[in-house]
Image: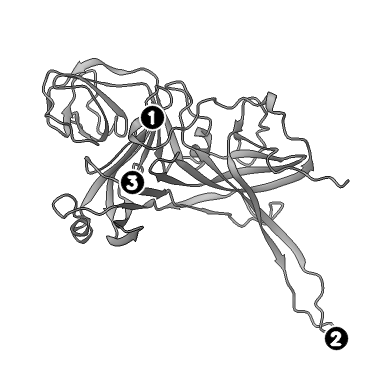
């Protein structure tokens, strides 16, 4: 019987490279990432000639270089331990995100010095450094009530703008704390590269110098999915069996669906918003520099530009409730925030502090009047924050 290999017997190993483009030798047990919808593709530069040969048939193409792409989906979830990065954190870093670990809680909890329904003026030990806590969670206790919110803006005067509108204005009796968390922010700094080993049953593809981009799909009642596309230099395709399941050490937390029963919330400009879906595209542009000294004529890829955009597919509302057409025409920017999870170590939040509305289009979804609103993040190196706490 001919050998038939199984697509499900696949494993992806990824490890940050010490030297860009040099094989970091990822190993099973420490470097695996749980993925689905795995695919590999190549951009081959085969040179077709038009030499006249005395006949209709052309001569052989000239083999040029090639580069590769690895694509897969990953579910959004925490590591299970507050302050410990999720196993896909290295993937985000290779998509030009910085990783900020707040290893100790800030605040005792600590009383605020002033507040409203959408702001809290913090006091020492909170630092008077603009945006230091932006996109981090803020646990609120004491009077008037306990609540969870996130910080969409933080000023040098220690004023924290909240992603939620609270039921009553905060008073000086309110106590606040930023818990242990891991935060990912878009960056324009030094680039991180990965070596990726892609096992498919008894075959192994190796890539080095991998960087990429990612898209997010937040759909109501579903687990949030990240779709990664990495570009890298192809090294080899060899015969090698995929690591046995017993030798793999994936983080054991399971994703939670985006719904209120498990901590889900969705806000626009500090107000709750309902709808079907929000999509977000980090929008990195990845290019391969030409280099005749390299084996395939290309150097390791670089990220040259980022344009982070998204789309809301939400239930239409009265003008008094939400008027994104006026926001679109006036260039008014508003925050967007989505969060989920109730168990420490497996809670996540995605916050975008200021967003430019690019359209306001009505649509029909099974008889429901919906609005489709395209948007663009509007803060340099801070358009979005992805937090695990």
Q: Decide if residue 227 is on the left or right side of residue 194.
A: left
Give how far across and how far down residue 107 sits, in percent.
26, 17
- Residue, far bottom: 54
Q: Decide if residue 296 is on the left or right side of residue 131.
A: right
CA gap between label 3 and label 2 equals: 60 Å
Q: Residues within 10 Å of mark 3 (few under 14, many from 20)?
A: few
The residue under the point 57% across, 50% down is: 301
| Among numbered discs 3 and 2, the one appearing first in the sequence | 2
| Among numbered discs 3 and 1, the one appearing first in the sequence | 1
Depth check, front residue: 339 or 371: 371
Depth check, front residue: 228 or 244: 244
Q: Quadrant of the C terminus?
A: top left
Tag 3–tag 1 contact (CB < 8 Å): no
Residue under numbered circle 1: 341
Depth check, front residue: 185 or 359: 359
Q: Is residue 270 above or below residue 183?
A: below
Residue under numbered circle 2: 54
Q: Residues within 10 Å of mark 2 (few under 14, many from 20)?
A: few
Which label belongs to residue 380?
A: 3
Give how far across and how far down residue 312 sits, in percent.
33, 52
* Callout in the foreground (3, 1): 1
Q: Is residue 304 above or below residue 362?
A: above
């Amino acid at each position: 019987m001919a050998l038939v290999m199984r697509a499900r017997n696949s494993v992806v190993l990824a490890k940050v490279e010490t030297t860009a483009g040099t094989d970091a030798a990822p190993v099973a047990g420490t470097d695996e990432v749980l993925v689905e919808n795995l695919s590999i593709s190549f951009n081959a530069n085969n040179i077709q000639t038009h030499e006249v040969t005395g006949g209709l048939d052309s001569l052989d193409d000239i083999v040029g270089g090639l580069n590769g792409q690895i694509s897969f989906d990953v579910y959004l979830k925490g590591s299970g331990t507050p302050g410990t990065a999720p196993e896909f954190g290295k993937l985000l870093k290779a998509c030009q995100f910085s990783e900020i670990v707040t290893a100790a809680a800030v605040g005792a909890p600590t009383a605020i010095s002033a507040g409203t329904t959408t702001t809290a003026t913090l006091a020492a030990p909170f630092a008077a450094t603009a945006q230091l806590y932006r996109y981090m969670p803020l646990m609120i206790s004491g009077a008037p009530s306990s609540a969870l919110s996130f910080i969409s803006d933080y000023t040098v005067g220690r004023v924290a703008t909240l992603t939620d509108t609270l039921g009553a204005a905060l008073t000086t009796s309110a106590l606040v704390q930023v818990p242990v968390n891991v935060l990912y922010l878009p960056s324009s700094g030094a680039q991180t590269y990965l070596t990726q080993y892609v096992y498919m049953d008894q075959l192994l593809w190796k890539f080095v110098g991998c960087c990429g981009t990612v898209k997010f799909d937040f759909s109501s009642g579903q687990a949030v999915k990240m779709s990664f596309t990495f570009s890298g230099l192809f090294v080899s395709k060899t015969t090698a069996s995929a690591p046995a399941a017993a030798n793999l050490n994936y983080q054991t937390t399971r994703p939670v669906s985006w719904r209120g029963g498990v901590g889900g919330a969705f806000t626009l400009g500090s107000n709750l918003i309902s709808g079907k879906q929000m999509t977000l595209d980090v929008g990195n542009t990845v290019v391969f520099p030409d280099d005749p000294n390299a084996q395939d004529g290309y150097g390791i890829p670089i990220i040259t530009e980022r344009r982070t955009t998204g789309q809301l597919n939400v239930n239409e509302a009265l003008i008094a409730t939400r008027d994104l057409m006026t926001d679109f025409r006036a260039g008014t920017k508003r925050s967007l925030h989505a969060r989920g999870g109730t168990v420490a170590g497996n809670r996540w939040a995605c916050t975008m502090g200021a967003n430019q509305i690019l359209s306001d289009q009505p649509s029909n979804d099974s008889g429901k009047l919906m609005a489709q609103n395209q948007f663009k993040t509007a803060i340099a190196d801070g358009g979005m924050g992805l937090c695990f706490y």
